[in-house]
Structure formats: structure tokens, C-alpha cells
């Protein structure tokens, strides 16, 4: 689900002086993905109830919003491909509505209307790497000439309409961020106030300013660990990269699954991106948008999306980073700085 988040190999520990017990860990596996609930407070019963509710939440999310497996969204996309209008479920209508301001804020680098392009590149699969023939230049050019416009979608209660039949919705980029918000509500109902949830290589915390930090190691896209960062209470760290789900280019290099809607091709120049923010949906979307936009647009997009804490490691082992993010990361090695750190706010939230 979502753009692959492979920048971080999450290693969580309790530092000296923190709680004298390891967190209660509940592991949920759905459709090949793994979610871990690491809970420091709350009763065993509360942890178990939370885990059950989270599993039901993630199963429901897949049933409604999976872009290419059987779901309510795949039904909507099938109708859009053959008609000018389609029924849309309440859950997916919610995703559509929250996507609009994010589409604009990201300068359309987050574009949930490009499902047909993702399919054309063969990324609707669980088998990686992909080694078959990529789409032809002619096919990409034709798609760009008839590119769907996300803002062209018209909503009338439970029905959407679009003039372009290439319009295929794919909300994968924000699904984990949306799930994070819902999981926070589940924890609140169970009175769990000190926890971290790990979804693949993304993570978010539940807590406050007095909560003991969680230490997360950052995986280096060129091997080993790049550094580590302490997550405070109520923070989300989301990432995107090009070296897990990818197709093999004719030159032998990797074409990551994150596509640039403007070129119709995989993102170029960026090896990995991370965004730290209190809003998990924004962090989720921004990490993929920055990845798609590439190094040349990093500064502009960080400012446009009001991101105080973001970083990118390029394919040339260069580092783009904001001032506040640099203060938060303890680097184990020093990538080559690509310009000075970007001052864009006083805190990550």
C-alpha cells in the first residue's frame, strides 16, 4: 500500500533512563505487509483490543481503497474506464476530498489520478524487481498528451464524473497516513498514551512533550545505517525511495515505482526522501511528492508545502536537508552537501 517507503530500516529502542520494561509489541500482518504496535503504557487487555481494532481498520481500508486488487475503488475505476461517471464509496470520497488541497500544495507531484500510468509501467504487482519491457516512448508520449486532470473530477453525492477515461484513481500515497490518524483515535479510546506504530518503514508516535523519545535508525540507501533520529511524542516520520519496488532499466540501473506525473516516467535523481511532521497524512504525501519532483525541485517544494523537517539523499550521494531536520538527525557519515541547509520554520510540526 502506498508508495514504497524504504529509506528507513526502523530499529526502535528505549534509551538509558527510560521505562524499565520493553514495550508490549503487537504485530499485524495483512496482504504481505506488517504493522507493529509498540505500546509502553496501557493494560495487556487494552493492547489486545487496540490490535484487533487496528487489524479491522487496515482490512477495511484495503477492501475500500486498494487501487488494483478487488475493492470498492477498483470498481469505481472500472466504471470510469467505460463510462463518464462512476459510483464512489463514502470512504473513497473522503480520500478524494482530502487529496485536493494536497494535490495543489504539492504542485501536482502528488496526483491520485494517474493510476493508468502506474498500470502502464507494470507497478501493479507484488513481484519485484520487474524485468519485462517498459512502456514505449510512444505510449508515454500519448499518455502525456491525454493526461487526466485530477481537478476535472466532478462530485455529485455518491457519484463522480470525469471527461477523460484515462482517469484512474490511486490513493496509495496517503493511505498509511490516513490509517495513522485513525489508529491514533483507536489508541485514545483504549487510553494508550505512550506508543509507536511502525508501518513498514514508516512510523508515528503517540505521546506528548514528556514522553520518552523513540530512537529510529536511518538506513543508508548506499548500504548500512546513515544515522539515527529521536522521535518525540506525536510525530510521524514517513519516507520514500527507489530501491525496493522497482523495474530494471535497459542500462541495468533501477527505475523506482514512484512516478513523476509531469514526465510520465519514474522519478530521477532522488535515492531516498524522509519527512518529519506531526500530521502523518502530510508527511506521507510530501515524502512521495518530493521523491517524484527530484533534487532540482526539493527547495521549492519544501517551501511550498511548508515542511520544516525534510531531507533527500540523491542518486549521486548528495544531501539536501532543512535546517531543523539537520538538528534532529545524528549522522553516522556525511553525504556530500548539495547547498546549505534550507531554513523553513522553527519546528517540525
Image (spheres, rainbow, N blue to C red):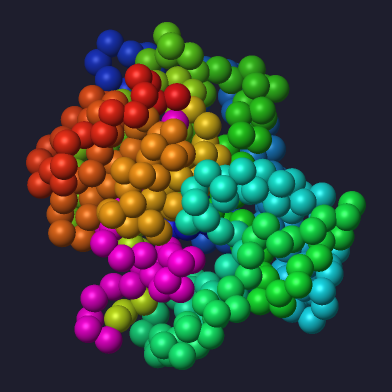
On the picture, is 315 further left or further right than 142? Answer: left
Residue 26 included in the magenta stretch of the image: no
Where residue 218 sits, quadrant-wise, is top left
Which residue shows up at 55% across the image and 40% down it?
A: 281
Q: Where is residue 224 in the image (x, y as percent from the top left)?
A: 17, 50
Which residue shows up at 21% across the image and 34% down it?
A: 341
Answer above or below: position of 74 versus 37. Answer: below
Q: Quadrant of the N terminus?
A: bottom right
| Residue nearest the viewer, comparing 119 with 69 | 119
Q: Where is residue 33 in the image (x, y as percent from the top left)?
A: 51, 56
Residue 115 appears in view = no
Q: Where is residue 9 in the image (x, y as percent from the top left)?
A: 31, 47
| Residue nearest the viewer, comparing 303 with 96 | 303
Where residue 4 sits, quadrant-wise, is bottom left
On the picture, is 215 further left or further right than 166? Answer: left
Magenta stretch: give its range.
Answer: 250-277
Where residue 187 sits, quadrant-wise, is top right
Residue 250 appears in view = yes
Which residue shows up at 52% across the image and 77% down it?
A: 144
Which residue shows up at 23% across the image and 25% down it?
A: 327
Q: Position of residue 307 (x, y in %)?
A: 41, 34
| Residue nearest the viewer, comparing 264 with 95 | 264
On the picture, is 295 further left or further right than 258? Answer: left
| Residue nearest the viewer, comparing 126 with 222 | 222
Amino acid at each position: 500500500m502506498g508508495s514504497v517507503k524504504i529509506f528507513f530500516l526502523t530499529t526502535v529502542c528505549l534509551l538509558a533512563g527510560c521505562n524499565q520494561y520493553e514495550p508490549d509489541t503487537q504485530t499485524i500482518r495483512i496482504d504481505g505487509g506488517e504493522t507493529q504496535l509498540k505500546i509502553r503504557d496501557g493494560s495487556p487487555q487494552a493492547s489486545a483490543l487496540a490490535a484487533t481494532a487496528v487489524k479491522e481498520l487496515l482490512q477495511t481500508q484495503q477492501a475500500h481503497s486498494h487501487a488494483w486488487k478487488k475493492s470498492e475503488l477498483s470498481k469505481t475505476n472500472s466504471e470510469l474506464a467505460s463510462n463518464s461517471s462512476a459510483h464512489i464509496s463514502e470512504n473513497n470520497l473522503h480520500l478524494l476530498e482530502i487529496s485536493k488541497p494536497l494535490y495543489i500544495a504539492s504542485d501536482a507531484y502528488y496526483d491520485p489520478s494517474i493510476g493508468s500510468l502506474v498500470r502502464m509501467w507494470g507497478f501493479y504487482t507484488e513481484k519485484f524487481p520487474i524485468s519485462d519491457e517498459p512502456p514505449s516512448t510512444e505510449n508515454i508520449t500519448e499518455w502525456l498528451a491525454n493526461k487526466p486532470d485530477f481537478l476535472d473530477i466532478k462530485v455529485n453525492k455518491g457519484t463522480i464524473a470525469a471527461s477523460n477515461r484515462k482517469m484512474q484513481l490511486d490513493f496509495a500515497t496517503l493511505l498509511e497516513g490516513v490509517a495513522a490518524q485513525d489508529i491514533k483515535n483507536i489508541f485514545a479510546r483504549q487510553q494508550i498514551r505512550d506508543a509507536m506504530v511502525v508501518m513498514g518503514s514508516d512510523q508515528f508516535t503517540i505521546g506528548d512533550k514528556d514522553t520518552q523519545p523513540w530512537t529510529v535508525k536511518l538506513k543508508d540507501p548506499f548500504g548500512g545505517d546513515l544515522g539515527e533520529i529521536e522521535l518525540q511524542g506525536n510525530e510521524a516520520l514517513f519516507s520514500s525511495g527507489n530501491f525496493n519496488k522497482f523495474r530494471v532499466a535497459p542500462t541495468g540501473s533501477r527505475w523506482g515505482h514512484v512516478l513523476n506525473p509531469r514526465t510520465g516516467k519514474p522519478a530521477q535523481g532522488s535515492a531516498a526522501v524522509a519527512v518529519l511532521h506531526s500530521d502523518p497524512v502530510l508527511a506521507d504525501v510530501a515524502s512521495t511528492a518530493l521523491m517524484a519532483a527530484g533534487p532540482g525541485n526539493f527547495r521549492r517544494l519544501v517551501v511550498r508545502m511548508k515542511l520544516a523537517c525534510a531531507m533527500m539523499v540523491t542518486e549521486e550521494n548528495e544531501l539536501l536537508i532543512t535546517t531543523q531536520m539537520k538538528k534532529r538527525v545524528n549522522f553516522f557519515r556525511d553525504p556530500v552537501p548539495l547547498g546549505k541547509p534550507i531554513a523553513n520554520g522553527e519546528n517540525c510540526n
